[in-house]
Amino acid sequence: MCFAWQFFAFCAASYSIFAAYPVEKNMPLNFLQEVIATFVFLFLVFIGIAGVTATTADNQSLVIGAVGFAAVAFMALTFNSTGFSMNAMRSVFSSIWFTILPIPNKGEKVDWGYQIIVNFIGSSIGGILAVIATSVVKSML
């Protein structure tokens, strides 16, 4: 059983839900894209949370909706470039499960270099930068 979308094909004989890989593998570019994607996504969420706590009860749903819409739009734009990871634990641990579980017709091996460098380290750096940027912005207000 295989479902094909515009950029990806997920097949039962491949990684399926167990890994996030880009369309074109370019480690430096994918690393940079993962850092930027994670940073922007978490920064939007953190600033949105700060905005919700700073607004009145009447405006909170608008702030939450705006942050959600912006996050979904940004994730849709980065889906092609990073394989839609933006979560180090989801990518790395699902690859560990893919390696451990006796899945029939695996056919492929996990690219641990890509998983660790791009998905784990890239996402972690993006998250740390988002926390730092959020604290800087909040201190300026």
Image: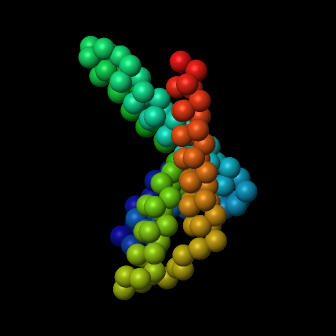
Q: Is residue 59 above or below residue 78?
A: above
Q: Is residue 37 visible?
A: no
Give the percent coordinates (x, y) of residue 97.
40, 75
Against 20, residue 32 (above or below) is: above
Residue 67 percent across, percent down from the top left: 42, 29
- In the rendered view, tell whether residue 12 sits above or below residue 67: below
- Extreme-front residue of the structure: 139
Residue 55, image x, y percentages: 35, 16
Do we see residue 49 in this rendering? yes
* Quadrant of the frame with the N terminus: bottom left
Residue shown at 49%/40% (left/top)? 42
The quadrant holding residue 53 is top left
Q: With 119 as the anchor, is 24 left or right in this view?
A: right
Name the residue: 57% across, 46% down.
128
Q: Is 70 left, or right, of 121 in this rendering?
A: left
Nearer to the camera, 112 or 45: 45
Residue 33 image point, x, y percent: 64, 48
Residue at the far right in the pictured view = 28
